Amino acid sequence: MGSKRSVRREFLKSGAALAGGLTLGAAAPSLAGQQAAESHHAPPSWPMIKGDKESNLVAYGDRSKYVTSVRIAHPVGGRPSPDQFGLTFHIASPLQDSVGVITPSSLHYVATTRGAFMPDIDPKEHRLMIHGLVDRPLTFTMEDLKRLPSVTRLHFIECAGNRSSRSGKNVQQTHGMVSCAEWTGVRMSELAQACERGRHPLPGHPHGAMQLADAGVLAGDRHLVDGHDAVIDRDQHTGKIRGWEH
């Protein structure tokens, strides 16, 4: 009777040991998989940028830290921008570092007349008013312009003060007051038609004058060379125009 109990006790012990071994064996692959997953997120041996909520890499993006192109005062040795009073003067684009024909918005040249404070234009408050030789003077908001047919074009613009000097060592220093961008906007002919401009025909191209927001001495009238083909731009590089610059 005693021998049967001992045999039964040994059988139960061996069964418990076998069950424990099977449990550990099942847990081992799971633990190994977890360790592998954790090692997958470990920093690699080559340089990487770790994302965090404090950076703008995800929300908007930033240029590579290895890109160091910057704008400079024009002409070389000219007045610094901003100066001690906060006025901004001519700033030239780093054309020598350009790849392709498009100038990044942040590196587009800046031109002000004898220095100016940069206007802070809120698109929601900005207005475009057309009046004069039209039957129906109109004022457009930016939302109004978005609802009208638009065109997208590549255009370069150049400052009248873009001049070279013998002291220039690269194209930024000699001709940096020129940039090229992709512009999106409404043709002036569309706006003229909305104002019923056709009832007051003028010889040649439609003549217009633009009043600007900068504080320069020459701020005021700017004549339209070709009113039919002119574009009232509202976007640059599929984004808002940096209205306090060009």
Image (cartoon, helix red, strand yellow):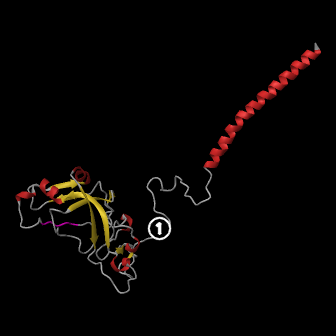
- Camera-nearest residue between 213 and 74: 74
The percent coordinates of residue 25 (x first, y second) are: 73, 34
Is 61 situated above or below 94?
A: above
Foreground of the two, 44 or 236? 44
Q: Residue at x 94, y 15 (%)?
A: 2
Q: Give residue 173's position: percent from left, percent from top.
A: 37, 79
Residue type marked 1: Val
Residue 76: give x, y in percent of width and height: 38, 81
Location of the N terminus by quadrant is top right
186 relative to 119, above or below? above
Q: Name the residue under label 1.
A: 67
> Quarter holding the C terminus?
bottom left
Q: What stretch is highlighted in magenta?
A: 207-211
- Side of 2 where 70 appears, left or right: left
- Please name the predominant secondary structure of the magenta segment in the image: loop
Q: What element carries label 1?
A: loop
Q: How crowded is mark 1: few (under 14 residues within 10 Å), some or many (20 or more)?
A: few
